[in-house]
Image (cartoon, rainbow, N blue to C red):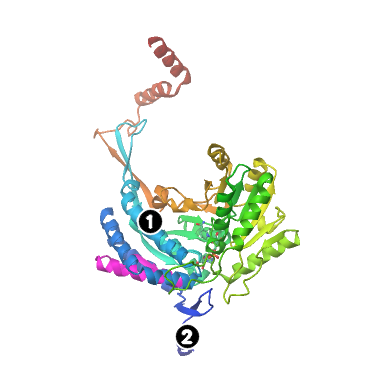
Amino acid sequence: MAQRMMQEPRPVIEVHSPATLAKIGEVPVNSPLEVRAAVQSARTAFRRWSALALAQRAEVLLAARDHLLAQQEELVTLICQENGKPRLEALVELVYVCDVITFYAKQARRFLAPQRITPHLLRNKKVTTIYNPRGVIGMITPWNFPLILTIGEAIPALLAGNAVVIKPSEWTPLIATRATEILQGAFRAAGVPPEILQVVHGYGDTGGALVDEADMIAFTGSVRTGKAVAVRAAQRLIPVSLELGGKDPMIVLRDADIERAANAAVWGAFTNSGQVCISVERVYVEAPIADEFTRRVVEKTKALRQGIDVNESPTGRRVDVGAMTFPKQVETVEAHINDAREHGAQILTGGQRNPALPGRFFEPTVLANVDHSMKIMTEETFGPVLPIMRVKDADEALRLANDTIYGLNASVWTTDKAKGERIAAQVEAGMTCVNDVLVGFGVTDAPSGGLKESGIGKRHGAPGIRRFCHEQVIVTDRFGMKRELLWYPYEAKTERLLQRALGALFSSKLSAKVKALLGKAS
Ligand code: NAD
């Protein structure tokens, strides 16, 4: 029996390109024991890595950036093959990762500098907070941005002194694996243990095993899985950050620049085939410009090119819209469109899988006559679909925009920027753009994350690196007296002193008198 078990083939995940459906590779499925071993070796490596000065870690990562750049063509091609996106979008993933390295290598010193606190009461104490790394960070990630959400997410964690073990999506495991190999080569060259960054593979069970071993989990994915991860992490009381789904509204007001808004709606809805957590998932447009806005959106959508970029063509027009990575997501898109159709929605363009292409391509789709009785307006579609709803005014748009369990991103469109910012502040979202879409994610200086069921915690900016640290407070006595006021033995005179202090410090009557006296004196 044992012999038979030993001969059983190791389970693997076969990876197929969503654009061509051809097999492009495979990875092993790691068992819980293997996940434990990965975390243990990461923890050993962590001790050496975290002992380096922040400036040394920054230097190592900046050198590693050059290793990634040297493999640019290979990485971009692999992202296109594995995820199905156009080359330009794949390149953006690499730009992001290089920028995150550059940004945090420079700013981490400021974000993680010890903070001096002057106590308002206990002035005889020196108080400082310091940021210590947490240990091994487990990262569980989705398939839509297979480089950004794995390596990009790992950078601030590593800089803060942690080791990282990534469990990438079973749909896109190759890119994180290859990028990690490149970075491990850079770490080795710098004399740093390569085990500070590792990848484990598998499905939900492997992710679950990582939750059971790591010191913190940074999860990006669906609300349903995010909740399951949070529940499992709660058993060990380890911190989690959750970057989850969205149903991001676009509010187009009657005084908007219609041309810019229409261009943004089309790109914001269809880039990465709509598989973006912060993509435009629904539009509310004020009635006076609704027809013209919709007409332009449909015209621009019909002009999009769908397919795969051919590597060899160095010049000329590229494809605009790629494939859909995850087969079940295509089914969700179809289900939402069918539901909308049954409830009276009108399909203005698209609405089906692209019959001219072999892979998982869904035609960019624009819908009108939609409302909140339809899934397309209330549930995350995560595909190339743009439903446009006509509203009577800004108040109605705002009410509908907030009528959702999500709160990730949004945009408001108007030529009156002050009005736009006022309305933006009333949208229940972690980030809202005025006259722009999606761009907030690229502003790595600013915290990005969701509220409501879109998640807990922030990436980017100071919180984006501090979340990978625990904040320790160091309180140092300044004067070295033999005994403090509140130490033993307890005495009546100490009690009287405290009573007097109570009145002097906290009595409203006394402070009113002092204020009055000060007022007379001035
Ligand atoms: P998913 O939740 O199905 O899977 C995410 C990851 O969790 C995968 O690696 C998966 O293997 C793993 N997993 C599944 N079950 C698990 C379990 N029980 N325990 C531990 N790990 C488990 O999400 P997906 O389909 O890969 O990604 C799409 C979702 O991700 C969308 O909802 C999208 O909005 C969201 N997303 C959010 C952001 C953000 O920053 N807010 C960014 C990208 C994607």
Highlighted range, magenta: 173-199
Q: Looking at the image, can residue 286 be seen?
A: yes
- From the image, state whether disc 1 or disc 2 is nearer to you: 1
> Which image quadrant for residue 63?
bottom left
Q: Was residue 178 drawn as part of the magenta stretch in this picture?
A: yes
Counting residues from the start of the chain, the first of labels 1 and 2 encountered is 2
Q: Amino acid at mark 1?
A: Val
Image quarter in which the C terminus is found: top left
Q: Which residue is labeled 1 in the image?
A: 100
- 1 and 2 marks in contact (CB < 8 Å): no
Count the marks: how many? 2
Position of residue 180 measured from the top left corner of the image (x, y, whole percent) = 37, 68
Quickly name the residue at label 2: 9
Question: Magenta part mainly helix, strand or loop?
Answer: helix
Q: Is residue 435 above or below residue 367?
A: above
| Residue at screen point 37% across, 56% down | 99
Q: Is residue 455 left or right of residue 476?
A: right
Front position in the image: 140 or 280: 280
Residue 188: horizontal and vertical position, in percent? 27, 68
